[in-house]
Image (cartoon, rainbow, N blue to C red):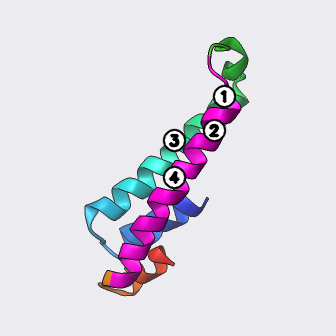
């Protein structure tokens, strides 16, 4: 949800492509994990411990979004970029 809101703010403000691309990537990966659990594919693909993969993805996403949002707040090209960073 946070990545989707950041994506909408970055898109509306016409922020540089890196901000928007990272927010889209993180939202897409989160949707894919959601579909994986919704369709119960995690039980069919038992060779990977999916909860650990989900936690690992969440930690990496939080770190990436933190760095991008800090850059967005520091650069602050317009109010939309500032809102996406916050």
Residue labelled with disc 2: 54
How far apart are labels 2 and 4 at the CA level?
A: 10 Å
Which residue: 44% across, 71% down? 69
Q: How many marks?
A: 4
Q: Which residues are magenta?
A: 48-74
Residue 50 drawn at (x, y percent): 66, 28
Which circle, 3 or 4, is nearer the viewer?
Answer: 4
Q: Are marks 1 and 2 in contact (CB under 8 Å)?
A: yes
In the figure, is residue 82 to the left or right of 61?
Answer: left
How far apart are labels 1 and 2 at the CA level?
A: 6 Å
Residue labelled with disc 3: 29
From this view, report whether residue 41 is shown above or below residue 17.
Answer: above
Q: Earlier in the sequence, mark 3 or mark 4?
A: 3
Return the residue nearer the eye: 86 or 62.
62
How far apart are labels 3 and 4 at the CA level?
A: 9 Å
Q: Are marks 1 and 3 in contact (CB under 8 Å)?
A: no
How far apart are labels 4 and 1 at the CA level?
A: 16 Å
Q: Which mark is residue 61?
A: 4
Q: Earlier in the sequence, mark 1 or mark 3?
A: 3
Residue 81 appears in which quarter of the rendering?
bottom left
In the figure, is residue 75 to the left or right of 34?
Answer: left
How far apart are labels 1 and 3 at the CA level?
A: 13 Å
Q: Earlier in the sequence, mark 2 or mark 4?
A: 2
Which residue: 39% across, 55% down? 22
Residue 5 drawn at (x, y percent): 54, 66
- The N terminus: image quadrant: bottom right
Residue labelled with disc 1: 50
Q: Are marks 2 and 3 in contact (CB under 8 Å)?
A: no
């Amino acid at each position: 949800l946070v990545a989707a809101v950041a994506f909408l703010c970055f898109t509306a403000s016409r922020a540089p492509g890196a901000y928007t691309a990272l927010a889209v990537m993180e939202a897409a990966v989160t949707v894919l994990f959601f579909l994986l659990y919704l369709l119960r594919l995690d039980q069919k693909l038992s060779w990977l411990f999916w909860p650990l993969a989900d936690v690992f993805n969440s930690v990496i996403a939080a770190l990436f979004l933190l760095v991008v949002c800090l850059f967005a707040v520091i650069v602050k090209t317009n109010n939309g970029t500032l809102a996406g960073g916050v």
